[in-house]
Image: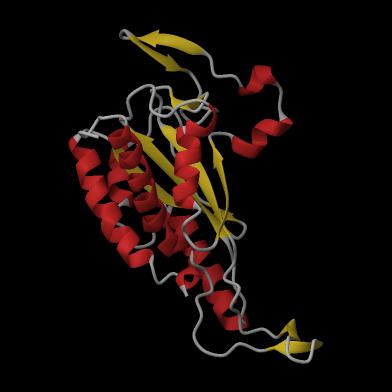
Amino acid sequence: GHFSGRLTAPLVFAGAVARQILEKHNIKIAAHVKSLGNVVDETFDETTPNEDIMCELSKQPFAVISDSAKQEMLDIMADCRKKGDSVGGRVETVITGLPVGVGGPLFDGIDGKIATYIFGIPAVKGIEFGRGFESADIFGSENNDDYFIDNGNVKTKTNNCGGIVGGMTNGMPLVFTTAFKPTPSIALEQDSVELNSMKDTKLKIKGRHDPCVVPRAVVCVESATALAIIDELSKNGVFGG
């Protein structure tokens, strides 16, 4: 069904069109595999993402910043395939060039808009903006972003908020991370139930199944993000409404 990833092809096609429109307005989107299992890739610079890296990532079928992390991730996937198991991971996304004030308070937040689109991707189990869940474990003095003037523009020294304050963009790069669960269809025997008899049983799945969807989910996240952004900007008349 649609949760097995069959609709990711039209999502990516629509997202590709949206990204081209956004790039004409100097709004750029890039994503990479932030982690796979216990292997962690390098992360984007939260305040000034490298545009060369952003551009290069979009050309990679397995988008990572660090080549060494990529090889470790490939090794984990190969091991999972051999064992008949699967592994999850995270995708980090950055958006640059967004004007200040995109979004709105309460139910009109740009973070809510993006989350709605991202959760349309199969296997997504969570999303966090900026420092995200880590901010629940620190003090306000550590989490607050200090402001300063840079050539007549208001900027922040850090970007713990992920470029969103009060549901609206603040002019800094918009950064968020998406969590993907391990593929549930695995070759290992699992406990299940037989509904006709209402008894416990064993489940053994056959066929070819991916050990990890995360590398291929990167472009899906980029596409869903592009659609969310262009939808929000169109609603506000930026592209004609």
Horizontal side, residue 86 vs residue 171: left or right? right
Looking at the image, which is closer to me, 222 or 49? 222
Can residue 42 be seen?
no
Left or right: residue 151 versus residue 191 is left
What is the x, y in percent for residue 106?
54, 28
Q: Is residue 186 left or right of residue 53?
A: right
Picture quadrant of residue 196: bottom right
Please tell me which residue is depicted at 36% across the width and 22% down the height of the picture: 100
Quadrant where the C terminus lies? top left
Compared with 16, 204 (above or below) is below
Count of numbered circles in the view:
0
Q: Position of residue 159 (x, y in %)?
A: 50, 26
* Foreground residue among 220 and 147: 220
The residue furthest right is: 199
Tell me the residue at 33%/45% (across/down): 226
Residue 81, position as x, y percentages in the image: 55, 79
Coloration mode: secondary structure
Nearer to the camera, 61 or 221: 221
**From where the camera sits, is residue 231 visible?**
yes
Tell me the residue at 61%/73% (across/down).
Answer: 184
Q: Position of residue 205 (x, y in %)?
A: 61, 87
Tell me the quarter of the picture where residue 215 sits.
bottom left
Q: Give 208 or 46, whichever is nearer the viewer.
A: 208
Q: Residue furthest left?
A: 24
